Image (cartoon, helix red, strand yellow):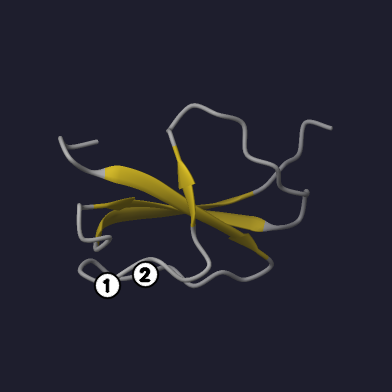
Amino acid sequence: MTGGNSYKYKVAANPTVPAVGVTCTTGYKAWDGEADIEAASGQKIVIVEVDSDNKCVGTGIADVTSAA
């Protein structure tokens, strides 16, 4: 993570992956990069690195496999 940037995430059955430069506020939750995230198996998670204006600078998506 670049200085001043932060992470946000969204969990859903078919979440949209934002393009670089898109503002990511609606439907996203803040994440510190370390805390556990509650999500059910079968869902997908999108993690977005945003700048101080909440604009996407990088993103990734993965299938959720719940530990519980």
Q: Is residue 33 left or right of residue 21?
A: right
What label does residue 22 carry, if any?
A: 1
Q: Residue at x 21, y 53 (%)?
A: 51
In contact (CB < 8 Å): disc 1 and disc 2: yes
What whole-number distance in Å separates the C-alpha atoms at marks 1 and 2? 6 Å
Q: Determine which residue is flagged by label 2.
A: 18
Q: What secondary structure is marked by label 1?
A: loop
Of helix, strand and loop, which one carries label 2?
loop
Q: Nearer the viewer, mark 1 or mark 2?
A: 1
The residue most toward the left is: 3
Kindly identify the residue that appears in the image at 35 percent across and 55 percent down: 59
User: In which image quadrant can residue 44 be found?
Assistant: bottom right
**Quarter of the figure with the C terminus:** top right
Q: Position of residue 56 (x, y in %)?
A: 27, 61
In the picture, measured across the screen, residue 49 lies left or right of residue 38, that is left
Q: Residue at x 47, y 71 (%)?
A: 26
Task: Give the image location of residue 6, x and y in percent.
Answer: 31, 43
Give residue 46's mark.
none
